[in-house]
Image (cartoon, coloured by chain):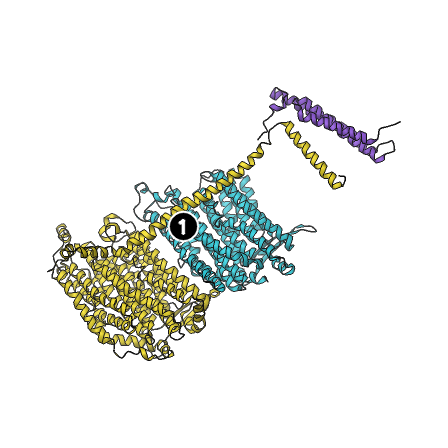
């Protein structure tokens, strides 16, 4: 059995093998176990990299090779090797490797590390499986696999001990959640999205007869019109999108990601910044050509709603999350909201690209570029945040302050990544965000465009706020206490520092070559896939050709937003000339706004009050009133009815022999009569 | 050779049952070991037969004896192991053997052990005979044996108000069984045969009234619905499962309940003309059951009762696959129907593994922690790591997480369900199935919620002394967990063969 | 010799049956019940004989097969009476009374 693309298979199989072997190595030696675990992830990364040369061939890709797996369902086990999967796989694999290296130092000394390595490796394997799978069933294996690992890793510190309040919990007041709760919440919320995705996959299968992406694309003229006539295409598409909404934490299923910060920071970096939450984006990118083709070539017009919904949800979520990041008090939560927000940008790009007749490749390029750059700088930010949390032993930013003197290297790395997030040229974040704005302007989505632009300003604001609160200003009380106890605040160890330094520099590097990067991506996606060929299937629509290049609008806007967001933040948090809490305290409007944003627009509360608690009460009520009160009582009533009826017959049993003989006599008479009747003598 | 051995899978337990009954005192612990050995024998026989059938060497094994031959009634005592009954019988034998091993380890001071294992083996042989039978009356006989044996087991070794609960279980099941008997009698009257494999021919030959066939099928289904605890005939199940001794609950839940589903595929689906009238009822009841069981499970504080409601919900899943298959057959799409039915059977096997693990865990908790009330537990993952892993795998199988067998079975059931709903192309039907799929979130909710309450968080102070269960307790569970994971990743060995047999079964019909 | 037709003997047996049953139904004394039982036995034997004569009427003999059965029946009747009386004696020893209404342990 020779494989044409061994790298494609090895990259996801090897970490899973590594995961299973981890407990065995743990029996040998704990250090060995750690290094072996990291080694497996390195092997996965190298396997993924073996596919990079394929990107530079001239020949188009969209190949897959597969083995029969479940013939009755027409399901094969196969991998798809095309620019989309190669790029995504490499991003995932290499960032995963760097984070595994970081974990060596970050998680040192934690009990239960075997479990940690097991799930981390299993996660990497599942994520790569998700990326490389060529059909939806296999993809779903990876999809749920990352969900399980996410659940297990968020709840890593499952003991929920109050002593670790500053490190392991998340939230404050009545929204404080222990790790086990956060894990459960994440799994259930993403499951809601997953079941919608499942339902959609089955509906599509019912009409198309296949789960494979390539077959769906090839046979689209057979199944898409049929589904559409049954009125099911748009519902199926929207249900399909609900899966990514859940996995990528978009509105309305976004509430699990901020609380997922209860897990270790390396987990947050890997799963909730760089990889798993991108799975939704990747999936939408994977199926975008299918729906795009249905919309533009087959002219199924209802699908425009599908793309518009994607764009709107993306833009709205971006705005929603950014506002919440502005008031958050925990460093990881700021980054979490920021992730939700930036993923919104990616969906906006994909949705906008779908709407454009010749925008498929553009939308994909934009979305994937932002995905790539975000993965790198967000991972860097999270890893540095982890170093800071380690140093200060707290997750709250009001316990930090003035750290630039103590941790200069981290300071520099984090600023590099933060500037990328804020979208400052020439960092990669600037280029990628700009392409998103461009494509949404071209698609004519004015509302989302405005939201995206405003969010850009908010992004700068909260980024600088975070950096200011952490590194600038005076030392907090806590730092003073810690130093008094003899606990030194010092720079992170190289094992931790080097990974995020690499990522931060990479973010700068990609930014420097940003324009070329975008072109390269565009070329890869168009020439190496059939996507550009799909463009030619669309009859050219003159009205959609923009005479004005969107860059003229978006570039200046981006710069303006940068300044609008940066200036207040600088004065409030970096140079500390203006006190924000004083401003807020003075105005009722601002105070209400602050509470509204701090309480997560009350959406979180609403979910608990509208769904979680009522469900439990409904269950209790169901049990009490219907099960016990209804069925059991009905049964008891039935039983006593039967018993009552039967006890009437007890009265016959008097015990008097004479009455029994009367009975015998009666019987005799009746038999005699019957015999006479039968004998015809009556 | 296997043909000759088939009757022994029933005879050997019968003899062993007498042995353990008579030689109760001197045998002591060997009572249980004899039970393990008899089921082990069945495991060996069925493994060989399953392997041979799946490898394509044989299509089926049959051994038929003439039992009653009179001028107007012919009954043949037959055993038939084919691609459907063989894996099901293997599953039953495996679960029985592992549960017996577990009982021997866990319940050392069981009073009257000989009688217990004697009845246990009667229960086992009832189930095996039921699966292998080729004749409706024989089926009924073995069914009754299993019911009586389980009644006796609950009555004697149960907890709480065991006599009342046992009687409720027995009467309910008997009422259902009598409906089934009515169906059998009617079949004999209208179709002139009691052999299961002759039913399709007779229907084609004699062409009876569809209304009569529907009546027969409805009567049989009522009997099966009682056994599968489908809403609204489910109320015997919670009390029975809670008060029965734990190993018996494990057997009842994993093996016995689903046999009604097996019987539906084997028997009911042969009455093809009648299926179009019952399929809608099956699907609707299935969806209601799924949601009802899971919704009730959510608020339970007694872990065993929670698992009982979970079983009700899972039986709903299985019925959904069957209902979808019925609908598809009635519209002529045999292969789509086969997928739904295969999914149901595979879910039966998957659920057997998962539920057995969970119920046996109840016993482990009773011994190690001393309680099965969830609100008194907490933080057990740290104290009992291996047990915790078992619980995860058990629950994950029920939740349908990929890499466990539950995922593939649910996938197949839902494929069949939406597929057949789309055949009818009524948006309402498809909407119903989508609701059903979304309702699987409830399964996630109660599973994860139980895990959180029992395994995570802080351990309450009275549980400080809790220690991990000895590995010998957990070995049976580990075997089942491995089976579940293996089937989850490589389901083909079962699904393809079962699919083939079911397809053949369906194509027998006109 | 002039005999009454067999039907009258049948009527006689029915009257005896009625008397016997009346005795069984209404008497509270155990021994009177046994007497009633005996009367019923006599009635049955008489009926059998008259039915046997109805077969061979108008000949003046009764089918010997019928007579055989009746003789055996009389013997059995005697045995039944003996057994019944022994049961009555036993019951009297146990319950110290001959009143049937006192033997109510078999009620519900």
Give x and y (percent) for residue A1: 43, 70
**Palette colour of chain B:** cyan
Residue A570: in sight, yes or no? Answer: yes
Residue, disc 1: B295
Is residue B211 shown left or right of residue A495? right
Residue A420 position (above or below residue C79): below
> Whole-percent x and y of residue A167?
23, 53
Chain that is coloured yellow in the picture? A
> Image height check: is A22 above or below A288?
above
- Position of A497 with respect to B229 (left or right) is left
Residue B506, quarter of the rendered image: bottom right
Q: In the displayed image of the protein, which residue is found farthest to the right? A: C1
In this structure image, what is the colour of chain C? purple
Front residue of B412 and A634: A634
Label 1 crowd bin: few (<14), some (14–19), many (20+), radius 10 Å = many
Is residue A261 visible in this depiction of the protein?
Answer: no
Q: How far from the left and from the top, in percent, is residue A337?
A: 25, 60
Quarter occupied by the C terminus of chain B? bottom right
Tell me residue A454's x, y (percent).
22, 66
């Amino acid at each position: 059995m020779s494989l044409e693309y061994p790298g494609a298979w090895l990259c996801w199989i090897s970490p899973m093998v590594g995961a299973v072997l981890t407990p065995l190595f743990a029996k040998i030696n704990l250090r060995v176990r750690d290094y072996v675990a990291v080694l497996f992830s390195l092997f996965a990364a190298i396997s993924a990299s073996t596919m990079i040369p394929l990107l530079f061939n001239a020949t188009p890709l969209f190949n897959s090779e597969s083995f029969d797996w479940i013939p009755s369902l027409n399901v094969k086990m196969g991998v798809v090797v095309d620019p989309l999967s190669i790029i995504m796989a490499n991003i995932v694999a290499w960032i995963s490797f760097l984070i595994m290296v970081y974990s060596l130092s970050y998680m040192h000394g934690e009990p239960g590390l075997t479990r940690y390595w097991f799930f981390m490796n299993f996660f990497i394997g599942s994520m790569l499986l998700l990326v490389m799978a060529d059909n939806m069933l296999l993809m779903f294996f990876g999809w749920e696999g990352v969900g399980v690992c996410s659940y297990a890793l968020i709840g890593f510190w499952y003991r929920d001990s109050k002593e670790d309040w500053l490190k392991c919990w998340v939230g404050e007041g009545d929204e404080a959640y222990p790790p086990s709760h956060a894990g459960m919440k994440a799994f259930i919320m993403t499951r809601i999205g997953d079941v919608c995705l499942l339902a959609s996959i089955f509906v599509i299968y019912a009409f198309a007869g296949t789960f494979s992406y390539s077959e769906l694309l090839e046979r689209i003229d057979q199944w898409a019109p049929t589904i559409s006539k049954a009125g099911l295409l748009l519902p199926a598409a929207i249900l399909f999108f609900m899966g990514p909404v859940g996995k990528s934490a978009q509105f309305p299923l976004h509430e699990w990601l901020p609380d997922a910060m209860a897990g270790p920071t390396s987990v947050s970096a890997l799963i909730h910044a760089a990889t798993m939450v991108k799975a939704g984006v990747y999936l939408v990118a994977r199926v975008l050509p299918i729906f795009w083709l249905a919309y533009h070539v087959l002219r199924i017009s209802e699908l425009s709603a599908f793309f518009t919904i994607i764009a709107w949800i993306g833009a709205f979520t971006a705005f929603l999350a950014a506002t919440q990041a502005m008031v958050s008090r925990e460093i990881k939560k700021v980054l979490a909201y920021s992730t939700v927000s930036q993923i919104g940008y990616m969906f906006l790009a994909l949705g906008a690209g779908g709407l454009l007749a010749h925008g498929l490749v553009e939308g994909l390029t934009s979305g994937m570029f932002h995905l790539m750059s975000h993965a790198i700088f967000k991972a860097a930010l999270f890893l540095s945040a982890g170093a800071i949390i380690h140093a200060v032993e707290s997750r709250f930013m009001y316990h930090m302050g003035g750290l630039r003197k103590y941790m200069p290297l981290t300071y520099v790395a984090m600023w590099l990544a933060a500037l990328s997030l804020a979208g400052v040229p020439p960092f990669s974040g600037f280029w990628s965000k700009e392409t998103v704005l461009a494509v949404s302007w071209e698609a004519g989505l004015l509302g989302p465009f405005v939201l995206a632009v405003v969010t850009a300003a908010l992004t700068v604001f909260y980024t600088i706020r975070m950096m200011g609160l952490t590194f600038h200003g005076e030392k907090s009380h806590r730092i003073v206490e810690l130093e008094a106890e003899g606990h030194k605040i010092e720079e992170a160890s190289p094992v931790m520092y080097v990974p995020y330094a690499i990522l931060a520099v990479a973010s700068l590097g990609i930014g420097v070559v940003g324009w070329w990067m975008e072109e390269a991506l565009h070329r890869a996606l168009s020439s190496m896939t059939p996507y550009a060929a799909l463009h030619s299937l669309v009859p050219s629509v003159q009205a959609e050709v923009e005479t004005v290049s969107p860059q003229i609008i978006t570039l200046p806007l981006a710069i303006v937003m940068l300044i609008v967001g940066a200036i207040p933040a600088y004065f409030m948090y970096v140079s500390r000339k203006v006190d924000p809490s004083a401003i807020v305290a003075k105005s009722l409007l601002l105070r209400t706004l602050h509470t509204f944003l701090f309480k997560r627009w009350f959406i979180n509360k609403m979910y608990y009050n509208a769904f979680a608690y009522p469900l439990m009460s409904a269950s209790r009520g169901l049990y009490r009133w219907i099960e016990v009160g209804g069925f059991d009582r009905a049964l008891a009533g039935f039983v006593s009815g039967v018993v009552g009826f039967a006890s009437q017959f007890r009265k016959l049993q008097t015990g008097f022999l004479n009455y029994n003989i009367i009975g015998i006599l009666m019987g005799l008479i009746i038999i005699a009569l019957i015999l006479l009747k039968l004998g015809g003598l009556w | 050779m296997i043909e000759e051995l088939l009757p022994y899978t029933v005879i050997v337990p019968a003899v062993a049952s007498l042995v353990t009954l008579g030689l109760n005192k001197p045998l002591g612990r060997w009572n249980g070991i004899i039970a393990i050995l008899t089921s082990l024998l069945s495991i060996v026989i069925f493994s060989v037969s399953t392997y041979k059938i799946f490898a394509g060497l044989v299509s089926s094994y049959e051994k038929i004896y003439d039992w009653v031959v009179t001028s107007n009634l012919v009954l043949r005592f037959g055993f038939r192991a084919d691609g459907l009954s063989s894996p099901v019988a293997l599953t039953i034998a495996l679960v029985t053997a592992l549960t017996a091993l577990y009982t021997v380890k866990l319940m050392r001071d069981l009073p009257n052990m000989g009688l217990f294992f004697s009845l246990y083996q009667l229960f086992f042989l009832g189930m095996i005979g039921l699966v292998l039978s080729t004749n409706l009356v024989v089926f009924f006989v073995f069914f009754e044996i299993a019911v009586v044996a389980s009644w006796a087991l609950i009555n004697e070794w149960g907890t709480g108000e065991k006599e009342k609960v046992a009687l409720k279980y027995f009467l309910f099941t008997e009422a259902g069984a009598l409906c089934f008997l009515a169906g059998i009698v009617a079949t004999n009257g209208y179709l002139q045969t009691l052999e299961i494999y002759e039913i399709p021919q007779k229907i084609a030959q004699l062409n009876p009234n569809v209304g009569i066939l529907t009546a027969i099928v409805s009567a049989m289904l009522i009997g099966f619905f009682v056994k599968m605890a489908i809403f609204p005939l489910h109320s015997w199940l919670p009390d029975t499962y809670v008060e029965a001794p734990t190993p018996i609950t494990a057997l009842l839940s994993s093996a016995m309940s689903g046999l009604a589903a097996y019987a539906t595929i084997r028997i009911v689906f042969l009455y093809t003309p009648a299926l179009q009238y019952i399929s809608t009822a099956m699907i609707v009841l299935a969806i209601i059951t799924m949601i009802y069981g899971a919704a009730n499970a959510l608020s339970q504080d007694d872990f065993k009762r929670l698992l009982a409601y979970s079983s009700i919900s899972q039986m709903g899943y299985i019925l959904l696959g069957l209902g979808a298959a019925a609908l598809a057959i009635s519209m002529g799409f045999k292969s789509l129907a086969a997928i739904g039915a295969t999914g149901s059977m595979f879910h039966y096997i998957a659920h057997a593994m998962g539920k057995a693990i969970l119920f046996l865990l109840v016993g482990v908790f009773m011994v190690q922690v001393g309680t099965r009330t969830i609100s008194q537990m907490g933080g057990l993952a740290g104290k009992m790591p291996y047990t915790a892993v078992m619980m995860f795998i058990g629950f994950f199988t029920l939740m349908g997480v990929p890499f466990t067998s539950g995922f593939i079975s649910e996938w197949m059931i839902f494929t069949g369900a939406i597929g057949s709903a789309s055949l009818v192309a009524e948006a309402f039907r498809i909407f119903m199935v989508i609701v059903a799929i979304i309702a699987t979130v409830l399964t996630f909710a109660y599973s994860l919620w139980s895990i959180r309450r029992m395994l995570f968080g802080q351990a309450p102070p009275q549980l400080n002394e809790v220690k991990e269960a000895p590995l010998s307790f957990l070995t049976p569970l580990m075997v089942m967990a491995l089976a579940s994971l293996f089937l989850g990743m490589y389901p083909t060995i079962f699904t393809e063969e079962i699919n083939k047999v079911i397809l053949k079964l369906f194509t027998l019909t006109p | 010799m002039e005999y009454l037709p067999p039907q009258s003997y049948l009527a006689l047996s029915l009257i005896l049956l009625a008397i016997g049953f009346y005795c069984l139904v209404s008497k509270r004394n155990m021994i009177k019940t046994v007497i009633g039982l005996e009367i019923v036995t006599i009635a049955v034997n008489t009926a059998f004989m008259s039915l046997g004569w109805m077969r061979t009427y108008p000949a003046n003999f009764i089918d010997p097969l019928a007579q055989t059965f009746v003789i055996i029946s009389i013997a059995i009747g005697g045995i039944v009476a003996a057994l019944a009386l022994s049961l009555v004696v036993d019951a009297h020893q146990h319950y110290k009374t001959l009143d049937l209404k006192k033997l109510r342990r078999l009620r519900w």
